[in-house]
Amino acid sequence: MQLKPRNNRDRDSSDAGARSSLRPSVFWRLVEDIPRPLNWMLSGISLGLPLILWWGITTFGSIDPKFLPSPAAVVSAFGRLWGTGELQQDTIASLWRVGVGFFCSALFAIPTGILMGSFRSIRALLEPLFGLMRYMPAPAFIPLLILYQGIDEAPKVTLIFIGTFFFNALMVMDTVKFVSKDLIEATYILGGNRLQTLLMVIFPHVIPGILDACRINLAAAWQLVIVAELIAATEGLGRRISVAGRFLKTDEIFVGIIVIGTIGLVLDLLFQYLIRVFCKWSEHN
């Protein structure tokens, strides 16, 4: 059986059909921006759908409120804790611990990571130690921190510092490692020295990556504050959740979790805003 060759018209129509079948839709654009209204709509669905499911399950399902309180019960618990002032005190205490611990972590981790990424000698000296430390769970240091620092605020802040410092430093180091060597060589050709290259080329180039690393690792700080506030804390969202769990007050547990999640989301959006505003030239936008 002999196949007849297709003429040019058939070939063109076939190619056009293949191209139309491969044309991406607005929703399935690969590594491209989507229209802003679609972005806002999808974000609203992401937050609204779980709330609707939660309301539906607690309203039409036969679930004991001790195991899953309704959204109305959680709102009522929020109003009760807010009215007594306990929620504000707990939130401020947790914000202070996370803020101080994470700020100190970033203050030391960012220059350390930049030096590790810029100089192979410093990387060879510190990377094995940092790689070892980041696999050690920070809560395992709690007995030592209590022994060395007592039960006041110091061990709580130090726990957050330990739990985020090594990750921050290594992520900043990885960001610096991907700075183009052509960019550095061009700086040397134009007469720049090593210090100028480090401060005026490498550091500005990695600022978006540094902000992104801090944005990601800030979540770990909020996870650690729950554990940190188990160390003889008298206030804090972690303590609030722990005490509520002891007395089966699941509505207050949900209040603490939602407040922590809301604060985390606001801080995450703040970091994204800083990247968009101060790093408009960056590919992170």
Image: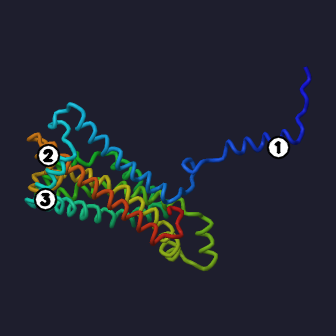
Give x and y (percent) for residue 114: 44, 64
Give x and y (percent) for residue 94: 19, 59
Give x and y (percent) for residue 67: 18, 36
Residue at horizontal 50 percent and vertical 76 percent from the top: 200
Q: Nearer the viewer, mark 2 or mark 1?
A: 1
Q: Mark 3 and 2 residues: CB-CB less than 8 Å, in contact?
A: no
User: Which residue occupies the extreme top position in the image?
Assistant: 1
Q: What amino acid does circle 3 point to?
A: Trp
* Residue 265 left/right relative to 74: right
Is residue 123 at all visible to an observer of this figure?
yes
* Foreground of the two, 226 or 48: 48
* Residue at the disc numbered 1: 12
Which numbered marker is on residue 242?
Answer: 2
| Real-space Cα separation, disc 3 to disc 2, in angstroms | 18 Å
Which numbered marker is on residue 204?
Answer: none
The numbered mark, 3 or 2, whose residue comes first in the sequence reads 3
Q: Residues within 10 Å of mark 1 (few under 14, many from 20)?
A: few
* Residue at the disc numbered 3: 82
* Residue 14 left/right relative to 264: right
| Real-space Cα separation, disc 3 to disc 1, in angstroms | 69 Å
SS for tag 1?
helix
Residue at horizontal 15 percent and vertical 61 percent from the top: 88
Q: What amino acid does circle 2 point to?
A: Ser
The numbered mark, 3 or 1, whose residue comes first in the sequence reads 1
* Foreground of the two, 105 or 60: 60
Q: Residues within 10 Å of mark 3 (few under 14, many from 20)?
A: few
The N terminus sits in image quarter = top right
